């Protein structure tokens, strides 16, 4: 459970920091995209991203529909995906089923208010497709 504790604290620190930076420096200039929303409804999310940045992402949507790999460009930070040369977007959240229930409970205990703000609680109740 020590790993779960550090992951929860890291998630909290990262997301609270992003909220402060957004609020004080980039108000109205930030688009928040939840990974779960992206994999469950990539067309809508890619169109939303494209509209926000002013770029047509139809080619990316077609690549995802054709199950093609997407090239990973320059990344400053992030998870292990940043180290690969390409990724495939999968409409699966199988990682959720691998996490023990007590870890789910632990995470929600520590991050519930911020998770609600970001819409994660709504996702778990209405959009889960496994």
Image: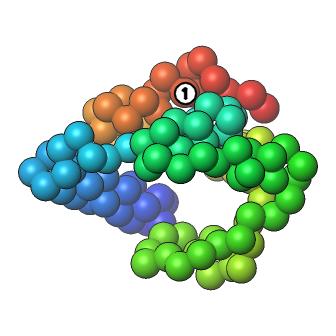
**Farthest top residue?**
126
Q: Which one is nearer the viewer's eye here, 75 or 60?
A: 60
Tell me where residue 65 sits by quadrant. Answer: top right
Q: Which one is nearer the viewer's eye here, 17 or 11?
A: 17
Residue 38 higher or lower than 12, as above or below: above
x then y, percent, for residue 23:
15, 46
Chosen colour scheme: rainbow
Residue drawn at the location 18% of the way across and 44% of the way down: 27
The residue indicated by pointer 1 is: 123
x then y, percent, for residue 108:
41, 38
Q: Which one is nearer the viewer's eye here, 73 or 14?
A: 73
Residue drawn at the location 31% of the way across and 60% of the way down: 14
**Farthest right residue?**
66
x then y, percent, for residue 52:
43, 42
Residue 111 higher or lower than 72, as above or below: above
Q: Is residue 33 left or right of residue 130?
A: left
Any part of residue 10 in sight: yes
x then y, percent, for residue 54:
46, 47
Residues packed near mark 1 inside 10 Å, few (<14), some (14 to 19) or many (20 plus):
some
Q: Is residue 37 left or right of residue 27?
A: right
Any part of residue 34 in sight: no
Quarter of the figure with the C terminus: top right
Secondary structure at badge 1 equals helix
Residue drawn at the location 53% of the way across and 44% of the way down: 50
């Amino acid at each position: 459970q020590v790993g779960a504790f550090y992951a929860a604290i890291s998630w909290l620190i990262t997301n609270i920091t992003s909220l402060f930076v957004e609020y004080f420096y980039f108000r109205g200039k930030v688009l928040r995209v939840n990974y779960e929303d992206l994999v469950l409804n990539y067309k809508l999310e890619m169109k939303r991203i494209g509209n926000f940045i002013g770029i047509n992402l139809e080619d990316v949507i077609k690549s995802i529909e054709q199950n093609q790999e997407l090239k990973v460009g320059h990344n400053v930070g992030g998870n292990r995906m940043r180290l690969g040369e390409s990724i495939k977007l999968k409409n699966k959240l199988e990682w959720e089923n691998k996490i023990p229930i007590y870890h789910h409970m632990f995470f929600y205990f520590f991050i519930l208010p911020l998770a609600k703000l970001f819409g994660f609680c709504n996702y778990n109740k209405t959009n889960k497709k496994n």
